[in-house]
Image: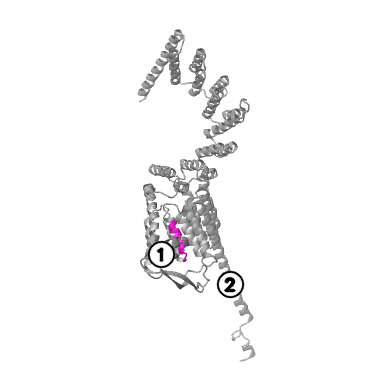
């Protein structure tokens, strides 16, 4: 083949042009691929962005509902369900934290919050949530048990694991061990100590349990019998008690049998280590010594141990029988925003009264706390609890109960704030008493009773500060009344209400009837159709001693000459005037004249009523 042939386009060699064309083609192909990839990424990002926007909008909508009405429990639960669905840590924390400020007794949601943190591997946060939960609703046995289960899981490879877990069990027992339905906590704690070889601790827990009324009391004694019959006596009771019982047994058995009552044997300590290695291996076992009692000594020792506990058990059973009916009638021991049945409320009241009559302060406090979980929406339960604490001179705890009620559970309840204010005033702090009401009035204006109580505090304070028989300085009281009466935002009827109160204050406390009369007449100019104002004016004249007949009749005529009072109200005043003239009047002429006026008024009402009926029939 010639050189030209070899270099011709037909040869196997590829020309630069061919290579360039091919490279150009590949370039276009890669460019199209990259373009499609970028387009696909942008599309995915847009979809993610659209999805994120939709989720954000939905979250805002859920939040808007609870912000509009923080008492809408269903809206709160829907918000929490949605943030769980979003699985976003920040959104969930914000929602749960806000929810628990309003509803701290919802133990199930504390569990959900803790599980959420755990699911996201925020282990320290999980502990924090459980701690907040048991602080808020310490009587929740279930919440403590879930906390303990988690604690055992995370502490098992740490130093002093048993001590750490035991400390939580102790706190749980202190918080809710006296709850009638705390059996599961007792059972688990005893098993924990037994499994860790702390048999004397387990025995001591049984001793406490036999003095605590609980629902499953009989099953605990059955388990205790198995416990006693499974171990040597000196391992399950205190050294002091063992020595006491053994001395009695030894003195009796020595009379009837020969030989030693026990032997000393060596054994491997199989108590689990306080800390497992990461591989799960236990350290080398220790060789220890212990007593092994002979069969007869063992039998007698165990009988004595059980007999001593049986006495406690029987005494506890009697206490339980006194409470059994009350406990059976508690159908809803947990928190809910729905009202309780009246029978349930009566049962709580009766149960509390029973426990108070027994005089055991600790049992009363536990029962009150249980009651508040179920009855958190009832003001009377909070007030009953606070007053009980106040009565036993636990003023600080009573104050804390009022704060819990007014700041968290029933922040819009006027009666609770009035009770809290009265408590502080009674304990010598009128400024705080007034501040409590002032804050409530600022957040929830319009409660006349709140304004009146604040005035009452001012009045009592002024009287208490008066010295050397001087007249109290009531200027603050009067100015507060006048501001309320003349405030343009005060509705007419409420303004009249305050005017009546101020007039009564001047008449009864300051003995200034003229000023009282002026206040009433001023109020009539603003509320001409209100019969209560005319009645108060009449009362001012009626209660003067000695009675001034002309003044009383003038007050009657003031009402009867009104252009604004209804005919029906005028008839009532006319009848009262007639009665007055008949019973206390000095002029027969005036009596006859008014009788004639009264009959005409009565006739006009009858005619008017007949005419209205006729008109009604015509229209019909």
Residue 329 seen by the camera: no
In the foreground, 37 or 540: 540
Residue at the spot 51% in from the left edge and 12% down from the top edge: 550
Q: Is residue 198 magenta?
A: yes
Dividing the picture into quarters, in which one does residue 421 lie? top right
Dividing the picture into quarters, in which one does residue 487 lie? top right
> Residue 135, relative to residue 498: is it above or below?
below
Provide the residue designation for mark 1.
Answer: 250
Q: Which residues are magenta?
A: 196-207
Q: Is residue 279 magenta?
A: no
> Residue 326, relative to residue 217: is it above or below?
above
In the foreground, 111 or 58: 111
Q: Position of residue 86 (x, y in %)?
A: 51, 57
Q: Quadrant of the C terminus?
A: top left
Q: Position of residue 279 (x, y in %)?
A: 51, 73
Dot 2 crowding, Cα within 10 Å, few <14, some 14–19, many 20+: few
Measure how far apart labels 1 and 2 are at the Cα level. 99 Å
Q: Magenta region's main secondary structure?
A: helix
In the foreground, 584 or 573: 584
Which mark, residue 30?
Answer: 2
Dot 1 crowding, Cα within 10 Å, few <14, some 14–19, many 20+: some
Q: Position of residue 118 (x, y in %)?
A: 51, 61
Q: Quadrant of the N terminus?
A: bottom right
Pick out the residue farthest to the bottom.
1
First-in-chain label (1 vs 2) = 2
Which mark, residue 207?
Answer: none
In this figure, what is the number of numbered marks? 2
Residue 533 seen by the camera: yes
Mark 1 secondary-structure assignment: helix
Pick out the residue farthest to the top.
589
């Amino acid at each position: 083949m010639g050189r030209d042939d070899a270099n011709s386009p037909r040869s196997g060699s590829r020309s630069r042009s061919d290579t360039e064309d091919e490279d150009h083609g590949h370039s276009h192909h890669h460019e199209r691929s990259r373009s499609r990839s970028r387009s696909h990424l942008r599309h995915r990002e847009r979809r993610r962005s659209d999805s994120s926007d939709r989720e954000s909008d939905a979250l805002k909508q859920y939040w808007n509902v609870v912000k509009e009405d923080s008492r809408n429990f269903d809206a709160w639960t829907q918000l929490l369900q949605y943030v769980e669905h979003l699985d976003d840590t920040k959104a969930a924390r914000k929602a749960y934290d806000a929810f628990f400020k309003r509803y701290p007794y919802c133990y199930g949601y504390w569990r959900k919050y803790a599980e959420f943190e755990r699911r996201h591997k925020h282990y320290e946060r999980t502990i924090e949530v459980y701690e907040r939960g048991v602080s808020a609703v310490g009587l929740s046995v279930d919440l403590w048990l879930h906390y303990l289960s988690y604690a055992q899981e995370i502490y098992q490879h740490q130093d002093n694991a048993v001590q750490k877990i035991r400390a939580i069990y102790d706190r749980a027992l202190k918080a809710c061990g006296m709850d009638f339905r705390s059996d599961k906590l007792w059972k688990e704690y005893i098993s924990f100590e037994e499994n860790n070889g702390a048999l004397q601790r387990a025995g001591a827990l049984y001793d406490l349990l036999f003095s605590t009324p609980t629902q499953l009391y009989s099953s605990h004694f059955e388990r205790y019998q198995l416990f006693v019959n499974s171990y040597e006596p000196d391992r399950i009771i205190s050294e002091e008690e063992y020595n006491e019982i053994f001395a009695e047994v030894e003195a009796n058995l020595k009379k009837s049998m020969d030989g030693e009552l026990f032997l000393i044997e060596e054994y491997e300590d199989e108590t689990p280590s306080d800390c497992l290695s990461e591989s799960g291996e236990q350290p080398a076992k220790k060789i220890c010594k212990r007593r092994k009692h002979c069969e007869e000594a063992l039998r007698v020792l165990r009988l004595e141990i059980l007999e001593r506990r049986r006495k406690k058990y029987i005494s506890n059973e009697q206490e339980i029988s006194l409470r059994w009916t009350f406990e059976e009638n508690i159908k809803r021991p947990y928190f809910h925003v729905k009202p309780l049945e009246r029978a349930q409320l009566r049962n709580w009241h009766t149960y509390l009264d029973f426990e108070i009559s027994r005089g055991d302060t600790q049992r009363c406090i536990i029962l009150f706390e249980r009651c508040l979980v179920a009855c958190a929406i009832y003001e009377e339960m909070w007030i009953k609890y606070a007053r009980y604490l106040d009565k036993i001179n636990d003023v600080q705890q009573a104050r804390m109960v009022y704060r819990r009620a007014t700041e968290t559970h029933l922040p819009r309840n006027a009666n609770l704030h009035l009770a809290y204010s009265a408590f502080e005033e009674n304990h010598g702090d009128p400024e705080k008493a007034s501040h409590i009401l002032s804050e409530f009035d600022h957040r929830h204006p319009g409660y006349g009773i709140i304004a009146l109580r604040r005035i009452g505090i001012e009045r009592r304070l002024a009287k208490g500060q008066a010295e050397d028989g001087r007249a109290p300085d009531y200027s603050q009281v009067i100015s507060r009344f006048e501001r309320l009466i003349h405030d343009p935002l005060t509705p007419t009827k409420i303004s009249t209400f305050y005017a009546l109160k101020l007039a009564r204050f001047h008449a009864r406390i300051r003995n200034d009837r003229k000023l009282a009369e002026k206040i009433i007449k001023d109020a009539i100019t603003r509320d001409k159709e209100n019969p209560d104002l005319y009645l108060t004016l009449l009362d001012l004249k009626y209660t003067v001693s000695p009675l001034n007949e002309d003044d009383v009749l003038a007050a009657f005529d003031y009402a009867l000459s009104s252009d604004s009072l209804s005919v029906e109200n005028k008839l009532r005043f006319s009848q009262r005037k007639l009665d007055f003239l008949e019973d206390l009047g000095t002029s027969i002429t005036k009596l006859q004249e008014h009788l004639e006026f009264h009959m005409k008024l009565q006739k006009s009402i009858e005619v008017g009523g007949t005419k209205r009926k006729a008109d009604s029939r015509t229209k019909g």
